[in-house]
Amino acid sequence: MEIIPEGRHFRLVQESELPEILDYLERFFPESLKFHQTIRTYLNDRVWEFKFYVSKDWPEKPILLHFPGCTLTPNNNIYQSFGIFCPSEQIEHVDLMRTEDILIDWQQPLYLNFTHIAIMNRLDDFYKEMGIMERLEGDIYVCNKLNTDLEFDELPDNAYMRQLTVDDVKHIHDLYPANEIECVDVFEILVKVLPGLGIFRKDTNELAAWMVHSYYGAMFSMQTRPDYRRLGYGIRLAIALTNKVIERGYKPFVVIRPQNDASRNLYTKLGFEKAYETCRVKMTPHPIKTNGAPEPSAPELDANADLEANKENQPIDEGIEDMLAEKCDIKADDDDADADAAAAARGQDKKATTADEGIGDDK
């Protein structure tokens, strides 16, 4: 589709400018980490094609955008999904978005991936007049120093760990709980250019657990099949992938649901610390009224129909929920070391997988 060279308040960044922007963003660590690592993976690995924008008064008004914000967007329009960063100490510059009507059509459904809670709150201050912002909370945990003193037993004789390949991608994507906002193509690229590990059964080659390094820098999408919990696969994957991420020069971080005690315990054991709160949102505009009758403002994604049609295939998600889910009613069970009871509490199928956006689900 046609790329917009400038908006009302923003201009398109040339690739030659990105290294300097990276240096600038380091001033605002850890808040800027996700946006920083998105640029870094773009420059180093070109996982996905992003368009970056800065304010026309950059850096006096230090607000940045990137389009798309995820790899599968409403109506296949990259401008209906975006990432945004603005330092919380200068959060007033987010108000530029209120009148940014060239890059963003606020009368269309919009997706934002995990973004600092202060930015989301500022956006919601004016968006609540336009539509509804459905939120999914997640806390950013960053590893500044990996705990290398942990000891583990060897993997069982019938299991082995290896790098994921393209042959694994279709199965992984089918089980991925947010596959309505991330396309299968990005997973094919991820396993080729970034670290991604899986633990498999030797006799059947069945994938028991897996985790990949994301295009936005996070270690995301750890999933463990129910039959393989409590075998230590989760923490093995987490520590192995953390080491690989560090070796490649990236800062390891994960997104953990506030209710997910097991994941938080796992990652704090490895040396991860909470940095800040975020949320992922789906923004749905209010219907436009014509002759007194409401009409859809844009083609809507029929979330309920999609969920009902694929009910049997929906993965259990004890951490980061499906973006199209109507409710975030996850309830952790204090006695479940895998945090899988949250899914069981909702009556999910036992044969589904567990998943979290960068979250381990067993110890």
Image (tube, rainbow, N blue to C red):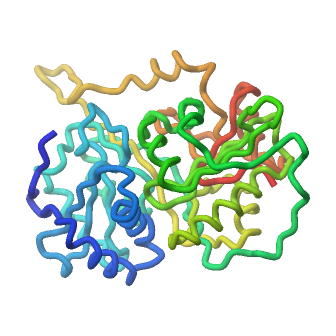
Q: Position of residue 329 (x, y in %)?
A: 62, 39
Residue at x-position 63% and y-position 32%: 315
Check the image and name the residue furthest to the top: 309
Residue at x-position 41% and y-position 51%: 113
Q: Is residue 334 visible?
A: no
Quadrant position of the N terminus in the picture: top left
Q: Position of residue 66 (x, y in %)?
A: 28, 57
**Vertical placement of 252 versus 209: above or below?**
below
Near-viewer residue (325 or 19): 19
Q: Position of residue 15 (x, y in %)?
A: 21, 66
Residue at x-position 34% and y-position 42%: 283
Q: Is residue 339 left or right of residue 120?
A: right
Quadrant position of the C terminus in the picture: bottom right
Residue 149 position by quadrant:
bottom right
Check the image and name the residue furthest to the bottom: 27
Q: Is residue 157 left or right of residue 95?
A: right
Near-viewer residue (279 or 15): 15
Near-viewer residue (208 or 71): 208
Residue 201 position by quadrant:
top right
**Vertical placement of 308 versus 156: above or below?**
above
Residue 340 position by quadrant:
top right
Q: Position of residue 130 (x, y in %)?
A: 24, 43
How many discs mark residues in the rendered view? 0
Q: Is residue 252 visible?
A: yes
